[in-house]
Amino acid sequence: MKENRVLTIQDFSSVGQCSSVAAVAIISAMGIETIALPIALLSAQTSSFSNYTYVDLSDNLLPSEKRIKNSGLTFDFIYTGYLGKSKIIGDVLKIQKDYPDAFFVVDPAMAEHGKLYDGITDDFVSEITKLCILSDFALPNVSEACMITGVEYKSVLSQKDITDIANKLYRLGVKNFAITGIKTESGMRLALCENGEINYFKINEISGQFFGSGDVFSSAFVGGLARGLNNEAAIKLAMEFTQKAIEITALDKEHYYGLKFEKALPYLVEKINGLC
């Protein structure tokens, strides 16, 4: 049986249990070879640390990929996280064209709580929208979904609001996606849209700010797909794993950055091996 291989393109934050660190650790733990091409090296994730170093590695992206390709390696999945600059999106598209049969997963990774991350420009929003349209599956949070569709962000949404946003994403050309982090009056929700059909999933909410939960969720989702799960099964697995990691992290009041997903990896491994 053929074993899948994943290429992930995003930043590498030394401290923070997020981005490439989470992607490589989680997808590898699920039994999938994972190769990372970092677009930048940070000493720490930016949400919890104001004093961090940043080294731009974007000029190394295409030369590194070219040498990997020339070695004869191919990829079955390409998964992008935080990219930060419009130029990098163009380079990602060039890489994606080198592996036209690879399943392409895009996490827009540009906004939260209705605001763009520091350094993200309006032209980036339009470019990442193009990337989402070209993807096989996109993973915007509710802030990103609103920005992509031009809908005014609201902290609490009705089901009609969610349906309207999902339908606008679909009409834009994003055919398969999940909108995460949706807050409603009756609790947190996730909306899964597959070719225009929308399904909603309830999320057990734990109070607190858990940085990197989107990265953990997206990585587990990609790992599930690479192990052969369909979109819905992979979404459910990613939800359960992220929930478990949040529960563990919430017990440690002094852990103010990232999710302690490492403690939840045995659960994930047991779960995926039972499913596949």
Image (tube, grey):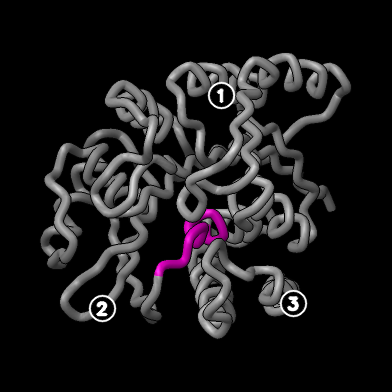
Q: Which residue is depicted at the point 65% across and 52% down?
A: 15
Q: Is there a contact, CB below 8 Å, between mark 1 and mark 3? A: no
Q: Distance between the residues labelled 1 and 2?
A: 36 Å
Residue 78 seen in this snapshot: no
Q: How far apart are marks 2 and 3 (CA)?
A: 28 Å
Per the rendered image, the range of residues in magenta is: 209-217
Q: Does 122 appear above or below 143?
A: above
**Circle number at residue 43:** none
In the displayed structure image, the side of residue 38 where residue 71 appears, left or right: right
> As shown in the figure, which amino acid type bears the numbered disc 2?
Gly
Element class at badge 2: strand
In the displayed structure image, the side of residue 238 where residue 275 appears, left or right: right
Q: Disc 2 marks which residue?
A: 187
> As shown in the figure, which amino acid type bears the numbered disc 1?
Val
Q: How far apart are marks 1 and 3 (CA)?
A: 33 Å
Q: Earlier in the sequence, mark 1 or mark 2?
A: 1
Q: Which of marks 1 and 3 is nearer the N terminus?
A: 1
| Residue at the far front in the pictured view | 51
Element class at badge 3: helix
- What percent of the width, then of the height, locates residue 104? 55, 37
In the displayed structure image, the side of residue 264 where residue 108 appears, left or right: left
Q: Which residue is depicted at the point 60% across and 47% down?
A: 44
Q: Disc 3 marks which residue?
A: 266
Q: Earlier in the sequence, mark 2 or mark 3?
A: 2
Q: Disc 1 marks which residue?
A: 92
Element class at badge 1: helix
> As shown in the figure, which amino acid type bears the numbered disc 3?
Pro
Q: Nearer the viewer, residue 16 or 247?
A: 16
Q: Is there a contact, CB below 8 Å, between mark 1 and mark 2? A: no
- What percent of the width, then of the height, locates residue 72? 86, 24
